[in-house]
């Protein structure tokens, strides 16, 4: 892997994305070779259990492939794929942690799966508590729930990739005013969804 | 909440994207409505959690033996499976059991063959434990047709898996492998399922025209008070009446 999945601006990125979109096994193999160790290293920060590290890394990588196959990633030029990968992979790993934490919370101490339950997940980091992970999940779910694809893409680039409105317009090839409208509507939809999902208006 | 307050709340939630009088109105309301201020602060705090997530570093992490083994296991799944070898053996065994259990249900006139629950091939009752597993059904058609796939969860709720809502039914050719997964991310899909036994019911329309969306909606239902098995049986009968065939694929542990 060149630099933790960051292949920079060389010519291999676009063919890789196109190969993944076409369900090409060779592209999948190449992607795993380039991306796996960075994802696995991040998983090690979240859990001390080697089986979970492996499972979460695999699940994240396969979901990334699925994202590309199903058009949830849009290639916008050199560097965009690996930039997206570095942002997206941690969210997927944290989602695995969320599911695990939720199960632990449901089962309670001592009711779990023997040794695994006695070996709690991850470092004692307050930023990894269940409530925060649920918020992350809610944001992602609400973003995916925005029905208008252009709004969703524009908002994704704004919130997750810190692009300016001008950069978003250039990346998506649409007028700046359209970007402003898409983001205004998308952001309102996202926030109303968050209010409902997180029950903030109670 | 009256309609004007609802409108003002929307303005407040998105006030940074407003201009002119609307922005002034939103800011004025924000000033006088403590609940709206609180709501906006909470929403912004939720959004801000995104920014607290570290990106993957660009620097190459030093691979350790566990990482190397993990990569090798992952590469071993290309292109067929997303699962590690440690899981594949029991899953394959369960697949055999599922097929053996299913064979009598398909029958000689079934329009499908090789029907199996998709990778992994086990349906588990505990929706939490199986949250990260992919589900679906794979098969080949004896002759071209429009497959209709419905999933019944542990509570007896039926969900239309294929064709997806809002999508036109597609004609599938004979003899080609078909895999129909549930929509979206597997973990989210499983999260909404009631725990308990699960069943897929597959029918194939061999008509020249695709089945109408409205007719398919009649097969989606919430759990009835009766036994779950009756709900599956009723669904199978109705699909058979509509399309002349219906194959049932159940978790072998639950039959």
Image (spheres, grey):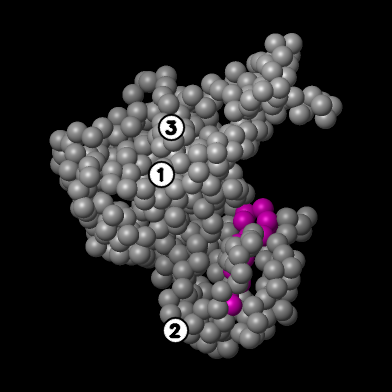
Q: Name the side, left or right, on which A20 lies relative to A107.
A: left
Please, is residue B166 above or below residue B172 in the view?
Answer: above
Check disc 2 and report its element: helix, strand or loop: loop
Is there CB contact under 8 Å for labels 1 and 3?
A: no
Residue designated by label 2 = B175
Check disc 3 and report its element: helix, strand or loop: loop
Q: Is residue A47 magenta?
A: no
Magenta region: B146-158
Give the class, few, some or many, for how many residues have Cα within 10 Å of label 3's Cα (few <14, many ≥20).
few
Rendered residue at 59%/48% (across/down): A148
Q: Are marks 2 and 3 on the same chain?
A: no
Q: Is residue A51 visible?
A: no
Q: Is residue B5 visible?
A: yes
Residue designated by label 1 = A171
As measured in the structure, the alpha-carbon distance from the residue carrying label 2 to the one carrying label 3 is 50 Å
Residue designated by label 3 = A164
As measured in the structure, the alpha-carbon distance from the residue carrying label 1 to the one carrying label 3 is 10 Å
Q: Name the side, left or right, on which A118 lies relative to B252.
A: left
Going from the N terminus, do you reach mark 1 or mark 3 first? 3
């Amino acid at each position: 892997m060149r630099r933790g999945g960051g292949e920079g601006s060389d010519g291999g990125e676009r063919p890789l994305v196109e190969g993944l979109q076409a369900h090409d096994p060779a592209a999948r193999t190449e992607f795993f070779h380039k991306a796996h160790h960075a994802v696995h290293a991040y998983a090690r920060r979240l859990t001390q259990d080697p089986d979970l590290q492996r499972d979460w890394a695999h699940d994240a990588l396969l979901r990334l492939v699925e994202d590309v196959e199903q058009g949830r990633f849009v290639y916008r030029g050199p560097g965009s794929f690996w930039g997206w990968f570095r942002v997206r992979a941690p969210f997927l790993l944290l989602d695995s942690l969320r599911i695990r934490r939720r199960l632990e919370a449901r089962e309670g101490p001592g009711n779990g799966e023997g040794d695994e339950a006695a070996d709690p997940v991850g470092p004692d980091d307050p930023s990894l508590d269940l409530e925060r992970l649920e918020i992350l999940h809610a944001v992602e779910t609400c973003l995916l729930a925005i029905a208008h694809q252009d709004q969703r893409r524009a908002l994704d680039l704004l919130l997750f990739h810190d692009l300016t409105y001008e950069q978003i317009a250039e990346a998506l090839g649409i007028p700046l005013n359209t970007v402003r409208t898409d983001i205004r509507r998308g952001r309102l939809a996202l926030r109303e969804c968050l209010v409902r999902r997180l029950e903030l208006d109670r | 909440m009256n309609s004007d307050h609802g409108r003002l709340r929307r303005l407040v939630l998105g006030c940074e994207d407003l201009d002119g009088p609307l922005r002034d109105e939103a800011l004025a309301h924000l000033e006088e409505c403590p609940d709206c201020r609180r709501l906006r602060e909470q929403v912004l705090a939720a959004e801000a959690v995104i920014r607290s997530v570290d990106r993957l570093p660009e620097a190459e992490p030093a691979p350790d033996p566990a990482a190397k083994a993990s990569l090798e296991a992952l590469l071993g799944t290309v292109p067929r499976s997303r699962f590690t070898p440690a899981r594949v053996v029991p899953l394959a065994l369960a697949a055999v059991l599922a097929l053996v259990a299913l064979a009598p249900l398909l029958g000689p006139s079934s329009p499908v063959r090789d029907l199996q629950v998709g990778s992994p091939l086990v349906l588990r009752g505990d929706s939490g434990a199986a949250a990260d597993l992919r589900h679906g059904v794979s098969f080949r058609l004896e002759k071209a047709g429009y497959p209709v796939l419905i999933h019944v969860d542990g509570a007896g709720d039926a969900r239309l898996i294929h064709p997806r809502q809002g999508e036109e039914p597609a004609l599938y050719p004979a003899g080609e492998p078909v895999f129909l997964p549930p929509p979206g991310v597997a973990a989210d899909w499983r999260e909404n399922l009631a725990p308990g036994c699960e069943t897929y019911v597959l029918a194939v329309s061999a008509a020249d025209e695709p089945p109408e969306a409205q007719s398919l909606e009649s097969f989606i239902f919430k759990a009835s008070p009766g036994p779950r098995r009756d709900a599956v049986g009723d669904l199978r009968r109705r699909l058979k009446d509509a399309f002349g065939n219906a194959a049932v694929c159940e978790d072998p542990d639950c039959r």
